[in-house]
Image (tube, rainbow, N blue to C red):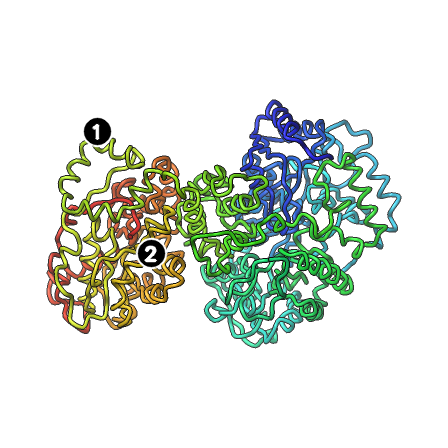
């Protein structure tokens, strides 16, 4: 199929739009978003189609067939071998064909569309005590169609098998337009079109090759995923066409509906964590645990989880995660304890608490992303060549899939791992194996140098050698993710030329025109072609930010995104995670962290997305990034889209007029200082509707927003004293505490003094620079930060801790300050001195007893607190104060200037509706609404009409009530003066406004 011209592409697009009711998008942005999956590979499509139903699929195939254009079916794009990429037209099933059509609990089956997310099926089945057995680590976003295409497995395959083991019937449409219903058996001879069970000639092909099919496939492999499963068509195997279709990677036909089998989900589960001296010991022990019939036997070593104690793991250098089930918690625990007694371990523990189990499973599930960064000091890296960027100093190296999931018979796993480690060393490579030890399947990311010609040659030689090693151990080149572009070329080493030639004949019966996913499985592309790094700049680009974890290289920072798509989890989110609020609000790939990283990748490549830093596609995607920093902590590889957005805005507007919001809210610290003497007058003017409307229009503020009220008395004017003599703490008067919410600062002073901690302010005006950073003005941010460091230098020389009340301000000082001023050692010293309010109390007044409130809480942990600072100290302080319950995760949606900017209001509200507003609506009258971040308080006030409070305000009020009722109950090591004064004082005109803290 020849390369298309621009005119050909436009004609194809017109034809598709004419025939389809679903979406047709041939824009550069849509094409850029689908050039890659979670693999090392990149192929540029002509366009993207989101079919509405099976009729749309058939119509799209007919149009593409008429134009001689290939088609690639795509789900969540989490494939690791490249099979979800392709030239031609990509069929995106995640937009419309994503329903769980029905669940039949009596038959234990479900009918699903190809774009249905696995966790949605598990939720529906779970209402009947059932589940879908296969559960890859991407279960929160992977689709059933993709699982069927890859024959996915997951951690529970030792109990419930692969996807192929759990498929009953499939409805598919071939590239030639034939609709087939695949199940067991060939179907009646002479079937009418649309009711056939198999392509014409397939029965004869199998009948003529029985001997080869019976002898050509290795046995004893629970995870044989490579190649086509032609042995499923043998009569003794039930002539199972649906099973043979599984793992075909979109090369035979396009799935439109599937009937899958469900299994009983144990009501209770326990997790036995078994510690072993090393990886080989754990691998050799895994097979011996299978007779206990566990649900999982997963393994990993300490080079993937170096802080094992911090993760709650028992002693050891490697661990097995062995899950058991039962009708009751006691039964599940008893089975886990039986395994512990029967296992020869170094150390072991059993976890029955569901929250504890989820936390430990997250360690395992995030490994596919975390393994892409090899810890520093884990071996000598190979040298760079051909101008490839160097690795970041002290941060280890990048690691990539490619030999991600080979499998061997479980009894051979220990020996295979020793040989595999030796092969890595022979080639000067490093990797961190982990995975499904009970099935003999190992995942590993390897620090291939895929940026230079020599590195790619090394990648190819290693691939050939490891294929030979796997075959020598009786294994499969793929044990879970399929062959794709990464391994299909090497299938003859596993199956021999004769069986691989039969694979090609099998493909031709289904797809004689070769229109479905060419280059995959049959007649494969070379494994060192189509690598996604080849198009990137060979030298680092000029940037404003430091990117210390990526060697100062923006291209390396963008490469961090490997496509595992944890950011694509559908809302509402569960747990404390924040990432990615804009994706959950819009459901669009371009508004996910991965989507934005892909667009930046293509911007740097300059092939599909043109215009460089002034690219319209990138700007539109980043415009709805809230800069919540959630990806910095929730993304397994630590993508920092907030910084990438600031970098992009810096370059986009270099020498150009900026949006009005950049001058108003970006320079807000300056304007608030100037406005302070006129606060009362300005507050009155803001309540005059025509004046407010004019101000909002000129300032780039959303018309739906209220203009914030200014404090008529700033925090520092209330202070007006030198502080407590010998005060150990410096309280940071951030811009918003100073001008919009001084009640928070006053409350913090009262509580800290009640705890015996003296407080003083910095010796001059300070500002963290956040508003300049978030609007992409790093040069101004640096100037502000340097002035701040000059003011803070005496504080830094004394080594005094700095208490910061606004989480976003604290996060900026912790991260952006040292990254923007890496050349100034004072920046790191100030970053290290930052403490949150709760952390300061815990560290410097550990014996202080806060007042006991005995009330439930609701509200939200600030997204920057979650992403950068952590909330452990806050949780402990709430517990000591008798504040029960959990704060919600997610992002409030205001996110500093974001929710105030014109054009963002609807997305801002949708983000608030994800977690924050529902948690507040369900709160009782006695519930305390906590929101340490000014963004969250503002959003609550403007959208829910409820007042959220900083934890300091809640504690200060309780102290005042205690003192009014009698002797002070709180104990401390110093004077409690100030704990009561002005306790009932109002907010001094303070109101809500754009959050942050500068």
Horizontal side of residue 920 vs 959, given as left or right? right
Q: Residues within 10 Å of mark 2 (few under 14, many from 20)?
A: some
Q: Nearer the viewer, residue 574 or 303?
A: 303
Q: Position of residue 741 (x, y in %)?
A: 21, 50
Q: Nearer the viewer, residue 946 or 238?
A: 946
25 vs 234: above or below: above
Mark positioned earlier in the residue sequence (1 or 2) = 1
Q: Position of residue 450 (x, y in %)?
A: 63, 56
| Residue occupied by mark 2 | 885
Horizontal side of residue 815 vs 514, given as left or right? left
Q: Position of residue 334 (x, y in %)?
A: 54, 67
Q: Nearer the viewer, mark 1 or mark 2?
A: 1
639 vs 833: above or below: above
Q: Secondary structure at mark 2?
A: loop
Residue at 19% over, 68% down: 758
Q: Position of residue 868 (x, y in %)?
A: 39, 58
Q: Image quarter for residue 654?
A: top left
Screen quadrant of the N terminus: top right
Residue 690: mark = 1
Q: Image quarter for residue 683?
A: top left
510 vs 559: above or below: above
């Amino acid at each position: 199929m020849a390369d298309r011209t621009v005119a050909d592409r436009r004609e194809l697009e017109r034809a598709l739009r004419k025939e389809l009711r679903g979406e047709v998008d041939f824009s550069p942005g849509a094409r850029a978003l689908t050039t890659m999956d979670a693999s090392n590979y990149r192929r540029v499509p002509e366009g993207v189609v989101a079919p509405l139903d099976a009729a749309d699929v058939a119509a799209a195939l007919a149009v593409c067939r008429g134009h001689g254009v290939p088609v690639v079916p795509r789900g969540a794009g989490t494939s690791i071998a490249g099979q979800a990429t392709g030239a031609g037209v990509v069929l995106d099933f995640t937009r419309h064909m994503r329903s769980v059509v029905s669940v039949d609990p009596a038959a234990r089956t479900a009918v699903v569309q190809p774009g249905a997310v696995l966790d949605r099926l598990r939720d529906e089945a779970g209402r009947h005590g059932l589940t879908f057995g296969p559960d890859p680590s991407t279960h929160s976003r992977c689709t059933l169609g993709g699982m069927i295409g890859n024959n996915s497995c997951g951690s529970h395959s030792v109990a419930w098998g692969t996807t192929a083991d759990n498929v009953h019937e499939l409805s598919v449409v071939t590239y030639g337009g034939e609709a087939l219903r695949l199940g067991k058996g060939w179907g009646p001879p002479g079937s009418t079109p649309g009711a056939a069970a198999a392509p014409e000639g397939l029965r004869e092909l199998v009948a003529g090759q029985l001997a080869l099919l019976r002898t050509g496939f290795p046995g004893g492999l629970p995870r044989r995923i490579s190649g086509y499963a032609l042995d499923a068509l043998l009569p003794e195997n039930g002539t199972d066409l649906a099973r043979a279709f599984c793992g075909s990677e979109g090369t035979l036909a396009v799935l439109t509906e599937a009937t899958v089998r469900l299994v009983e989900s144990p009501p209770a589960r326990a997790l036995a964590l078994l510690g072993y001296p090393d990886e080989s010991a754990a691998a050799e022990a895994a097979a011996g645990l299978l007779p206990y019939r566990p649900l999982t036997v997963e393994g990993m070593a300490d080079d993937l989880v170096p802080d094992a104690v911090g993760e709650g793991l028992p002693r050891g250098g490697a661990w097995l995660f062995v899950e058991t089930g039962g009708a009751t918690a006691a039964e599940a625990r008893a089975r886990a304890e039986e395994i512990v007694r029967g296992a020869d371990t170094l150390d072991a523990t059993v976890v029955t608490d569901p929250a504890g189990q989820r936390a430990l499973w997250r360690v395992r599930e995030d490994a596919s992303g975390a393994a892409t960064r090899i810890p520093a000091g884990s071996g000598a890296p190979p040298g760079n060549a051909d101008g490839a960027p160097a690795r970041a100093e002290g941060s280890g190296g990048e690691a990539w899939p490619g030999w991600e999931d080979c499998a061997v018979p479980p009894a051979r796993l220990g020996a295979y791992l020793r040989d595999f480690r030796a092969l890595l060393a022979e080639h000067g490579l490093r990797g961190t194996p982990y995975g499904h030890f009970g099935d003999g399947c190992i995942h590993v990311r390897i620090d291939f140098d895929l940026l230079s010609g020599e590195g790619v040659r090394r990648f190819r030689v290693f691939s050939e050698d490891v294929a030979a090693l796997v075959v020598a151990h009786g294994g499969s080149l793929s044990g879970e993710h399929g062959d794709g572009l990464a391994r299909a070329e090497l299938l003859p080493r596993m199956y021999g030329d004769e069986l691989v030639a039969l694979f090609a004949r099998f493909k031709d019966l289904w797809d004689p025109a070769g229109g479905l996913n060419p280059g995959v499985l049959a007649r494969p592309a070379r494994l060192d072609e189509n690598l996604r790094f080849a198009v990137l700049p060979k030298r680092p680009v000029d940037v404003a930010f430091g990117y210390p974890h990526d060697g100062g290289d923006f291209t390396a920072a963008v490469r961090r995104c490997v496509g595992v798509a944890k950011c694509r989890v559908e809302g509402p989110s569960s747990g404390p995670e924040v990432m990615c609020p804009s994706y959950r609000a819009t459901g669009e790939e371009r508004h996910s962290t991965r989507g934005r990283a892909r667009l930046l990748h293509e911007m740097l490549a300059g092939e599909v997305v043109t215009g460089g830093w002034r690219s319209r596609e990138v700007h539109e995607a980043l415009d709805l990034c809230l800069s919540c920093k959630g990806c910095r902590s929730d993304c397994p590889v630590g993508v920092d889209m907030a910084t990438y957005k600031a970098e992009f805005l810096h370059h986009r507007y270099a020498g150009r007029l900026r949006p009005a919001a950049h001058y108003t809210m970006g320079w807000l610290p300056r304007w608030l200082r100037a406005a302070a003497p006129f606060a009362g007058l300005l507050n009155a003017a803001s309540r005059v509707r025509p004046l407010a409307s004019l101000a909002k229009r000129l300032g780039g503020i959303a018309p739906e927003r209220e203009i914030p009220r200014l404090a008529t008395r700033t925090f520092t004017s209330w202070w007006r004293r030198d502080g407590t003599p010998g005060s150990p703490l410096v309280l940071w008067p951030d811009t918003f505490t100073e001008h919009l919410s001084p009640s928070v600062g006053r409350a913090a002073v009262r509580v800290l003094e009640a705890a015996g901690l003296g407080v003083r302010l910095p010796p001059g005006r300070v500002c963290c620079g956040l508003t300049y950073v978030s609007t992409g003005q790093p040069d101004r941010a640096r100037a502000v930060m340097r002035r701040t460091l000059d003011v803070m230098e005496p504080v830094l020389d004394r080594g005094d801790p700095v208490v910061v009340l606004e989480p976003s301000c604290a996060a900026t000082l912790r991260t952006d300050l040292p990254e923007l001023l890496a050349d100034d050692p004072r920046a790191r010293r100030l970053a290290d001195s930052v403490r949150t309010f709760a952390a300061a109390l815990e560290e410097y007044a550990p014996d202080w007893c806060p007042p006991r409130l005995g009330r439930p809480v609701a509200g939200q942990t600030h997204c920057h607190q979650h992403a950068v600072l952590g909330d452990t100290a806050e949780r402990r302080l709430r517990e000591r104060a008798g504040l029960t319950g959990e704060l919600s995760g997610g992002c409030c949606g205001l996110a500093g200037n974001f929710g105030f900017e014109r054009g963002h209001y609807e997305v801002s509200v949708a983000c608030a509706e994800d977690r924050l507003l529902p948690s507040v609506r369900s709160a009782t009258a006695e519930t305390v609404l906590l929101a340490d971040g000014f963004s969250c308080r503002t959003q609550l006030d403007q959208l829910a009409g409820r007042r959220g409070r900083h934890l300091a305000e809640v504690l200060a009020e309780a102290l005042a009530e205690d003192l009014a009722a009698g002797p002070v109950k709180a104990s401390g090591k110093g004077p409690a003066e100030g704990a009561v004064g002005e306790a009932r004082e109002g907010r001094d005109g303070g109101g809500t406004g754009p959050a942050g803290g500068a």
